[in-house]
Amino acid sequence: MWHHSEDAFEQRWEHIKHRFGMNQMGDETLIEPWSLSPFIRHTPDYICKLKSGAQAFLVEVQGTGKDMLHKFKFEKLEMLGHWNKHQDVWFWLWDNKNQRETLISLNRIRLLIAQGKATRDSFDGGKRPYWALPVGEVYEQSDWYESRNRYM
């Protein structure tokens, strides 16, 4: 699922982008993600700019499952919070069913969780907890258009 999202980002992002995080589309036999600290393992996927000379921001690319939920693992949100202290972190979320993307800040995702709009669940029998937000809710709550001027 994740590789479809990164392919969609590569095809649709029309601005400056530089691959930054673990390229899990590459050869995973060289460095296994589990062997790294959580902070390094959750390095955002891209450094982006809207134009040359503008402020850069970090982008984490994610897709959605057939259940039409965006799932944000607790550990990933915590580690991206550390990255966010140094450079703004945004999620570029791909909705494969509707063939649309949403750009939403890490801060807005945290707000939606705090407002009780997310449900708690887990992968692997409780070993990897996550927050789930409906695709439509995330799409409607995107703060990109109200925030993007700071990156111009």
Image: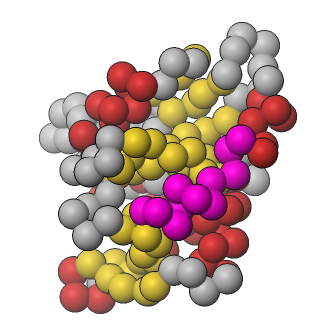
Please, which residue is most extreme toward the top here? 52
The vertical placement of 31 against 41, above or below, is: above
Q: Where does the image place residue 98, in percent across and percent down from the top left?
A: 32, 48
Q: Is residue 91 visible?
A: yes
Residue 71 figure quarter: bottom left
Predominant SS along the magenta part:
helix
Give the mark count: 0
In the image, taking residue 3 as reference, residue 9 lies left or right, namely right
- In depth, the one of 65 and 52 nearer the eye is 65
Q: Residue at x 26, y 70 (%)?
A: 67
Q: Residue at x 21, y 63 (%)?
A: 66
Q: Where does the image place residue 89, in percent across and percent down from the top left?
A: 64, 48
The vertical placement of 51 against 148, above or below, is: above
Q: Residue at x 25, y 40 (%)?
A: 3
Q: Where does the image place residue 130, in percent across and percent down from the top left?
A: 41, 77
Magenta includes 77? no
Q: Check the picture and name the quadrant holding the C terminus.
A: top right
Q: What residue span does the magenta drawing correspond to?
A: 135-145
Magenta includes 138? yes
Q: Is residue 43 visible?
A: no
Residue 146 figure quarter: top right
The vertical placement of 27 against 64, above or below, is: above
